[in-house]
Amino acid sequence: MIKDFTERELDRIIEMAWEDRTPFDAITFQFGISEQETIEIMRKEMKPSSFRMWRKRVQGRTTKHRKLRENITGRFKCSRQRNISGNKISKR
């Protein structure tokens, strides 16, 4: 059973599911829905061709499934990402 979500919540669920590095566990934690429920939302809200492309891409992907990840404590951070300190972006 899919819960009633606002349009904004549905957009965020879809965005998180579409991102390669956001695991399904994060969606479960934030919205209280299982991986299967997330897949059902994606199937319902996306065009069939987009859904098939997404399923093919995420199926078995280690970054989408926390149990398959090697380093679950670390988070990805681009080496070019700037540090934020005191509400100001520091320059290189």
Image: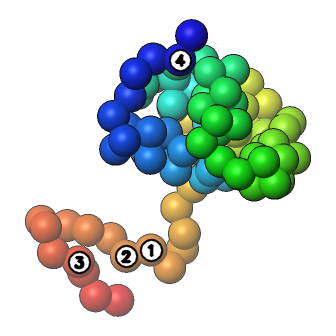
**Discs 1, 3 touching: Cβ within 8 Å:** no
Q: Is residue 30 above or below residue 8?
A: above
How many angstroms separate mark 3 from mark 2 (CA)? 7 Å
**Badge 4 or badge 2: first in the primary sequence:** 4
**Badge 1 or badge 4: first in the primary sequence:** 4
Q: Identify the residue under disc 2.
A: 82
Q: Quadrant of the N terminus?
A: top right
Q: In terms of secondary structure, where does tag 4 sit?
A: loop
How many angstroms separate mark 1 from mark 4 (CA)? 37 Å
Q: Identify the residue under disc 1.
A: 81
Give the amino acid at mark 1: Gln
**Discs 1, 2 touching: Cβ within 8 Å:** yes
Q: Is residue 20 above or below residue 85?
A: above
Give the amino acid at mark 4: Ile
Instruction: Decide if residue 43 is on the left or right side of residue 56.
Output: left
Where residue 86 sits, quadrant-wise, is bottom left
Q: Position of residue 68 (x, y in %)?
A: 79, 31
Mark 2, Cα crowd under 10 Å, few <14 / some 14-19 / many 20+, is few
Instruction: Decide if residue 30 is on the left or right side of residue 72.
Output: left
Q: Identify the residue under disc 3.
A: 89
Q: Position of residue 64 (x, y in %)?
A: 70, 39
**Discs 3, 2 touching: Cβ within 8 Å:** yes
Residue 71 in view (yes/no): no
Q: Residue at x 60, y 42 (%)?
A: 45
Mark 4, Cα crowd under 10 Å, few <14 / some 14-19 / many 20+, is few
> In the depicted view, which residue is nearer to us: 29 or 47?
47
Q: Position of residue 77 (x, y in %)?
A: 52, 61
**Discs 3, 4 touching: Cβ within 8 Å:** no
Give the amino acid at mark 2: Arg
Q: Identify the residue under disc 4.
A: 2
How many angstroms separate mark 1 from mark 2 (CA)? 4 Å
